Amino acid sequence: MLRDNTYMGTRKSKLTLTADVSVITMAKRLAAQRNTSVSALFSRLIVSMQAEQNADDNDLGPLTRRASGLVTLADGRSDRDLLADALADKHGLSG
């Protein structure tokens, strides 16, 4: 359920969440320890997660971002294995 209101010039919406009782207890305890509200904790969590995702997205260039996931590695091979093989080939170190 969402309900809109404005508080001190900032638009706020009320959100009702459902969680395990233990999670609610943890959230209330964390909020009290930080002298804040569960709502503020939730808001900071979401903002932090979005910032982390944006940072991850910005780490890759647009071409790399589009190409990610296009290659499937052979079973038992890691990206490090492929890189090591490519470098060995490049520098004539292959057996």
Image (cartoon, rainbow, N blue to C red):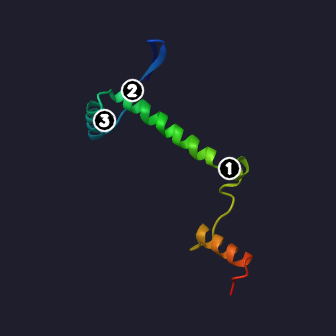
Q: Nearer the viewer, residue 70 or 83?
A: 83
Compared to residue 95, the image places residue 24 above or below, namely above
What is the total number of numbered labels drawn onto the structure image? 3
Q: Which residue is mark 1?
A: 65
- Asked if disc 1 and disc 3 are in contact, CB closer than 8 Å, the reply is no
Q: Nearer the viewer, residue 94 or 79?
A: 94
Q: CA distance from mark 1 to mark 3?
A: 35 Å
Horizontal relation, residue 49 to residue 65: left or right: left
Precedes in sequence: disc 3 or disc 2: 2
Q: CA distance from mark 1 to mark 2?
A: 35 Å
Q: Residue at x 55, y 43 (%)?
A: 53
Q: Amino acid at mark 3?
A: Ala
Q: Which residue is mark 3?
A: 27
Precedes in sequence: disc 1 or disc 2: 2
Horizontal relation, residue 64 to residue 49: left or right: right
- Split into 4 quadrants, where in the image is the N terminus? top left
Using the image, tell me which numbered label, if any, was put on residue 16: 2
Q: Amino acid at mark 2?
A: Thr
Q: Position of residue 20 (x, y in %)?
A: 31, 39
Rate crowding at label 1 as few (under 14), some (14 to 19) or many (20 or more) other CA atoms within 10 Å.
few
Q: Residue at x 43, y 36 (%)?
A: 45
Q: Residue at x 71, y 50 (%)?
A: 66
Q: Would you identify the image quadrant in which residue 81 lies?
A: bottom right
